[in-house]
Each structure stands twice: as structure tokens, then as C-alpha cells.
């Protein structure tokens, strides 16, 4: 059902096709489209560069690469309205707040973060013991931000590293690392539980440092003290 068509003219050159790409991505995000079909008039060599550009553009393909990667995620997505603040005790903390009051503030911040998310949003670190709701709130953010049309990768760090390892040893033809470096939001769940494999440290460094350099937001949830992680990674995580 079309409520109106977007008419515009562009030049038949790289700037013109880039404008088409940008407007297409904007339309996808504004309308939460899950599939798009691009139809070009057959004009021989005059359409060739446009078709090639649009069919291979990383930004247009990113959404579908992310969806393919997320199929392997074993973590269920939740809605914010499933959050049960009564689960938390009313013990008073040194801050003066009760655990319940503090978690309610965390919850409100996460809701606001998801509802107002854009590529300039800050990165977040959730740290604490098992059972505090780190993964739940991360999954609720992932669900809401995805519904708003952004590309979100959400999985445990160990699963992400396993996928990258399989690709590097030729057991898969996907490109998980590229998706992690370019998705609008990456959520690294259970950071620090991947063990002490020295081969993983450069990969984690590349993911975190790469997204920092691109000014792309990420969310890290961890049970470990960040100072207990490898020096280079903990320093990046605290930025």
C-alpha cells in the first residue's frame, strides 16, 4: 500500500547513484521495510553502473547480512514491557537508593536509549553479576532498535568469535567481522566469558577499536571487571 511516491531526479553518474542509495536506505529505515525490490529501465550501458553499484553496495546489503548472522543467536529478544521491577529487592545501597529504585532508573535509561537511538548514540557498558538483567535489557534494546529500522547484531561474544574462527579456517563463506564492524549497533553479550584464548584478543581488539574509529555505538555486557580483561581491550571498553 503506497501513501505516496517519492519523486526526484539525479544525474547518471556516481553522485547520482549514491543519492539513490542514500534515499533508499532512508526510506527503508523510516518505514521498517524488510525487503526491497529495485527496478531499472533497460538502457544498456547507461544503466550498467547503477545496477552494479546498487546490487553490491555494502550499506544496502548490510541489513540482510545482519539478519543472516542473527539467525545463529541463541538469545531470545524481549520487549521492555516484560521487565519486572518487582523482581529486584528493596535493600538499601550505599548510594542511598534501593536495588529496585536503581534498576528502575537503569530501565528508564535503556528505554530512552532505544527510542532515541541513532548513529551518534553513546556506547554502553553493562557490568554486574549474573541475574541482574544485563542480557534482558540488551535484548530489549536490540528488539526496539531493530524495529526502528537500524541494523543490530546481538549475540554472545563466544558465538561471534566462533563464527569468525570458522570463516578464517574456511569452514564458512560468511564475513562476520565485516558485519560487526559496520552494523549500526553491535551488542557484545557476556563479554569476558570467551576464555583466555590469546588468538581471540586481536579479533576483539579489531572489533572494538574498529567501531570506535568509525564512531559507531556498541553495547558491552560483562560479568568481569573490565580491569581484569586484557589491557588493550579493557582500555578500549572504558572509552
Image: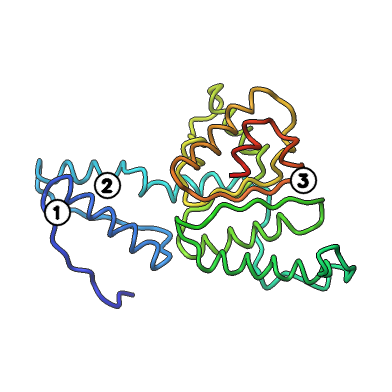
C-alpha span from label 2 to label 1? 14 Å
Q: The C terminus is located in which quarter?
A: top right
Q: Nearer the viewer, mark 2 or mark 1?
A: 2
Q: Are marks 2 and 1 in contact (CB under 8 Å)?
A: no
Report whether residue 72 is seen.
Answer: yes
Asked if residue 48 lies left or right of residue 164, the reply is left
Please report whichever mark, 2 or 1, sits nearer to the chain's N-terminal start.
1
Q: Is residue 67 above or below residue 142?
A: above
Kindly state the secondary structure of the residue where label 1 is placed. loop
Measure the alpha-carbon separation of dots 1 and 3.
55 Å
Q: Nearer the viewer, residue 12 or 221?
A: 221
Count of number-bearing discs: 3
Figure check: 7 above or below 126: below
Q: Residue at x 88, y 68 (%)?
A: 92
Residue 147, image x and y in percent? 51, 64
Crowding at label 2, few (<14), some or many (≥20) Cα neighbours within 10 Å? some
Q: Position of residue 139 (x, y in %)?
A: 64, 58
Q: Which mark is residue 54?
A: 2
Q: Residue at x 35, y 49 (%)?
A: 60
SS at badge 3:
loop
Between 16 and 63, the one nearer to me in the picture: 16
Q: 107 or 228, which lies in front? A: 228
Residue 150: image location, x then y, percent: 46, 58
* Residue 41: mark in rendering: 1
Sequence-wise first label, 1 or 3? 1
Instruction: Give residue 62's position: percent from left, percent from top.
Output: 42, 47
The image quadrant that residue 19 belongs to is bottom left
Q: Residue at x 61, y 53 (%)?
A: 124
What distance separates the C-alpha of mark 3 from that of mark 2?
A: 42 Å
Name the residue beneath numbered marker 3: 223
Q: Residue furthest front?
A: 95
Amino acid at each position: 500500500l503506497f501513501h505516496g511516491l517519492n519523486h526526484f531526479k539525479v544525474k547518471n553518474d556516481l553522485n547520482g547513484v549514491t543519492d539513490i542509495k542514500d534515499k533508499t536506505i532512508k526510506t527503508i529505515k523510516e518505514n521498517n521495510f524488510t525487503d526491497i525490490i529495485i527496478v531499472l529501465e533497460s538502457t544498456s550501458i547507461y544503466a550498467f553502473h547503477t545496477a552494479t553499484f546498487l546490487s553490491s553496495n555494502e550499506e544496502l546489503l548490510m541489513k540482510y547480512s545482519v539478519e543472516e548472522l542473527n539467525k545463529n543467536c541463541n538469545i531470545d529478544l524481549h520487549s521492555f514491557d516484560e521487565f519486572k521491577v518487582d523482581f529486584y529487592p528493596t535493600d538499601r545501597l550505599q548510594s542511598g537508593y534501593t536495588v529496585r529504585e536503581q534498576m528502575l532508573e537503569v530501565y528508564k535509561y535503556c528505554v530512552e536509549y532505544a527510542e532515541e537511538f541513532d548513529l551518534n548514540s553513546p556506547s554502553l557498558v553493562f557490568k554486574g553479576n549474573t541475574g541482574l538483567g544485563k542480557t534482558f535489557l540488551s535484548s530489549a534494546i536490540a528488539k526496539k532498535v531493530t524495529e526502528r529500522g537500524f541494523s543490530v547484531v546481538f549475540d554472545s561474544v563466544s558465538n561471534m568469535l566462533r563464527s569468525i574462527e570458522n570463516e578464517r579456517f574456511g569452514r564458512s563463506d560468511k564475513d562476520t567481522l565485516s558485519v560487526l564492524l559496520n552494523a549500526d549497533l553491535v551488542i557484545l553479550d557476556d563479554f569476558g566469558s570467551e576464555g583466555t584464548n590469546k588468538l581471540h584478543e586481536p579479533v576483539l581488539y579489531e572489533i572494538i577499536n574498529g567501531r570506535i574509529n568509525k564512531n559507531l555505538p556498541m553495547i558491552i555486557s560483562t560479568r568481569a571487571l573490565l580491569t581484569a580483561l586484557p589491557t588493550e581491550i579493557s582500555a578500549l571498553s572504558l572509552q
